[in-house]
Image: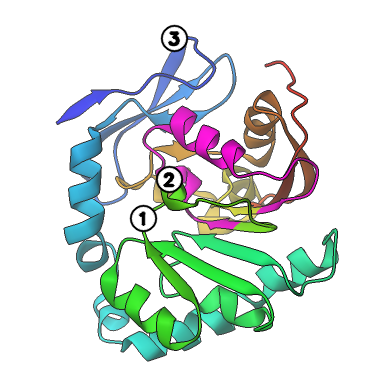
Amino acid sequence: KLIKNNCLCGDDNDIILSLIDRHCVQFITVVCKSCGLIRAKDYFRNEDIENFYTNFYRTIAYSEAYKALSTSEIFDRQKTNSKFKYDLINEYKIKPLNKLKIIDVGGGVGGVLEHFSNDNEKYLFDFYDPYLDFAKTKGIRSVKGGLDKVDFKPDIVILSHVVEHWNNFENEIQKLINIQKKNETLNYIEFPGVDSIKKGRREGDILGDIHLPHVYYFTSYVFENIMNRNGFEKIYSDTLTKSIYIYTENKKNL
């Protein structure tokens, strides 16, 4: 069941961007004229979301070739394709990358964490049991769930292609705030930045980004303003968007 999805800025000032998603499923996407946020006009209830990601997402959203890979092959591929995340975190680190608590929320099989040395405490939070079980064999502490299951304050938080799926952004960002070490925790956040489309991603076609599992479609600068309004400060960001934020408590205006 679909329910109304209000804009994060609180205004009701939308124009329609598209009536379908990239698979030609009827799914209305709008742009807020007040803050620039692109979002699903209506979205599924919490119970629908949990059912979808537990039972259907990986069987529907992934290609047949990807689904044919073993868990070990997926782990190796994820590790190979994520080195840039480690490099960016290493470039903007506040303290040496050892003896830290590092969490990857929605991190799949945990390949990203393999880049960090084993003298760190590495945690994977996800909902897919086969991936969680495999990550344990790699020395990664695996927990079934999301931010609500984090009961400590980590030094590094990785949220890669997660925030665009948040169906209750206000609740999730508060959970993220609750686990922050003020002015210390580095938050690596990545999503398909809309502003990279004008630089050639998807051959300049924004309709290719519209995907039923995604609630939001951020440009780097709209996302930065959302984070600023919640007390986070940008350390780094690009158009793709790969970004690093730190929590300062200093909230800015729309």
Q: CA distance from mark 1 to mark 2?
A: 7 Å
Residue that label 1 marks: 145
Q: Residue furthest top?
A: 12
| Dot 2 amino acid type | Asp
Q: Are circles 1 and 2 on residues that touch, CB within 8 Å?
A: yes
Q: Position of residue 40 (x, y in %)?
A: 36, 31
Give the structural element (helix, strand or loop) at label 3. Answer: loop
The amino acid at mark 1 is: Gly
The boundaries of the magenta stretch are: 158-187
For the N terminus, give its image quadrant.
top left
Sequence-earlier tag: 1 or 3: 3
Q: Is residue 14 visible?
A: yes
Quarter that holds the C terminus: top right
Q: Is residue 167 magenta?
A: yes
Give the class, few, some or many, for how many residues have Cα within 10 Å of label 1's Cα (few <14, many ≥20).
Answer: some
Q: Which residue is mark 2?
A: 148
SS state under label 2: helix
